[in-house]
Image (spheres, rainbow, N blue to C red):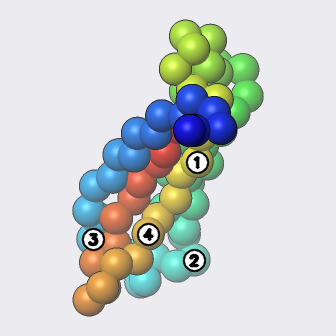
Amino acid sequence: MPVKDLRTIELGWPTHPLEHLYRKKPSGYCSHIIGHEGPGSLFALLKEEGLADALSAGKVLLINGILTFSFTF
């Protein structure tokens, strides 16, 4: 029997290799914008609608240098 009712959606998409942009950190900007939890944010809207209790965003490196960017709520 489950301890709590939990549903998860994970969305992701492939990106180009970003190693050459390590000083500019484009994935960091995306993570910050999507993962921000302040007033007026995506998370605030989802929480207000009862669709999310938490939100995380970031890059994931898969095999053979394939990079995906995903967020979970």
- The residue at the point 54 percent across, 69 percent down is 24
The Cα atoms of the two marked residues, 1 and 4, are separated by 12 Å
Q: Report which residue position mark 3 lands on.
A: 16
- The residue at the point 56 percent across, 38 percent down is 1
Identity, as a three-letter code, of the amino acid under mark 3? His
Residue 23 position (above or below residue 71): below
Q: Report which residue position mark 1 lands on.
A: 56
Identity, as a three-letter code, of the amino acid under mark 1? Ser
Q: Residues within 10 Å of mark 4 (few under 14, many from 20)?
A: few
Q: Are marks 2 and 3 in contact (CB under 8 Å)?
A: no
Q: Residues within 10 Å of mark 2 (few under 14, many from 20)?
A: few
> Is residue 29 left or right of 8 when viewed as pictured?
right
Q: Report which residue position mark 2 lands on.
A: 23
Q: Are marks 2 and 1 in contact (CB under 8 Å)?
A: no
Identity, as a three-letter code, of the amino acid under mark 4? Val
The extreme front residue here reads: 1
